[in-house]
Amino acid sequence: MATVDLAEVVDPSLVLLTVEEAARRLQIGRTLCYRFVSSGELESITLGHLRRIPADAVPEFATRLRKRQNPTRTITVTTAA
């Protein structure tokens, strides 16, 4: 019988994630995730004393990282007259 680690289960109904949950989704460490939050690269909000990351901010962050590392090259085509 296969066992499932409950910490690895992703709940798609969550609107706000803890930093640890966001780090798990990004497959990075908690400290690095806090660094992205502190720098403003990963959107977060505060609720009282709690720091939360909107669930939709995680894929947006990953998309920005991909674009930054693999910028689209523009090709200029000129035709001879």
Image (cartoon, rainbow, N blue to C red):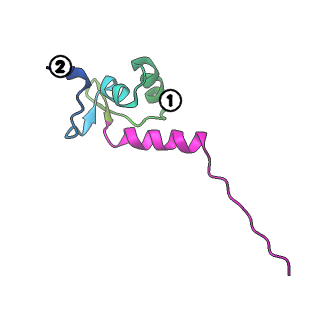
- For image coordinates 85% across by 77% down, the residue present is 80
Q: Residues within 10 Å of mark 1 (few under 14, many from 20)?
A: few
In percent of width and height, residue 5 lies at: 21, 20
Q: Secondary structure at mark 2?
A: loop
Compute the Cα span from label 2 to label 1: 37 Å
Residue receiving disc 1: 39
Q: Quadrant of residue 42?
A: top left
In percent of width and height, residue 13 lies at: 19, 40
- For image coordinates 47% across by 44% down, the residue present is 63
Q: Which residues are magenta?
A: 54-81
Tell me: 29 left or right of 39.
Answer: left
Q: Amino acid at mark 2?
A: Thr
Q: Residues within 10 Å of mark 2 (few under 14, many from 20)?
A: few
Residue receiving disc 2: 3
Mark linked to residue 73: none
Q: Secondary structure at mark 1?
A: helix
**Which image quadrant: the C terminus?**
bottom right
